Amino acid sequence: MSSSSRDAKWCVPRLERALKKHQVGEIKACINSIAVRLRCWLRAFRAGARISIYVKKSACHCAEVHS
């Protein structure tokens, strides 16, 4: 991936930029990243966990923080 450090923000703004520039590979990567995060949230909610969300290398990540 050719993402600069200033793109290390939330997935949605990154996706919007990719859509404007018609970067198909980047769009797919963003959608996949968002889908992974949503699945992580759902698992954490089902487990009754508190959720910590952080951003690393221009992709969204979800860390489950169990109480």
Image (cartoon, rainbow, N blue to C red):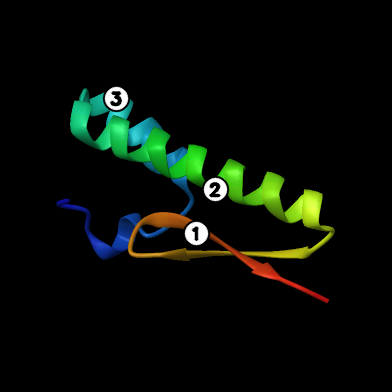
Asked if the residues shown at circle 1 and circle 2 are in contact, with their CB atoms under 8 angstroms apart, the answer is yes
Q: Amino acid at mark 2?
A: Arg
Query: Of circles 1 and 3, which is in front?
Result: 1
Real-space CA distance between mark 1 and mark 2, rounded to the nearest whole angstrom: 6 Å
Return the residue at label 1: 61
Is disc 2 surrounded by few (<14), some (14 to 19) or many (20+) residues within 10 Å?
A: some
Examine the rendered structure and indicate whether residue 15 appears above or below residue 2. above
Q: Amino acid at mark 3?
A: Lys
Q: Amino acid at mark 1?
A: His
* SS of the residue under disc 1: strand
Real-space CA distance between mark 1 and mark 3, rounded to the nearest whole angstrom: 24 Å
Q: Earlier in the sequence, mark 1 or mark 2?
A: 2
- Seen in the image, is 30 located left or right of residue 55? left
Return the residue at label 3: 20
Tell me residue 41's x, y (percent): 67, 49
Q: Earlier in the sequence, mark 3 or mark 2?
A: 3
Residue drawn at 20 percent across, 33 percent down: 25
Which of the labelled discs sits on residue 3, or is there none? Answer: none
Query: Of circles 3 and 2, which is in front?
Result: 2
Is disc 3 surrounded by few (<14), some (14 to 19) or many (20+) residues within 10 Å?
A: few
Examine the rendered structure and indicate whether residue 57 appears above or below residue 30. below
Q: Quadrant of residue 53?
A: bottom right
Tell me residue 62's x, y (percent): 57, 60
Return the residue at label 2: 37
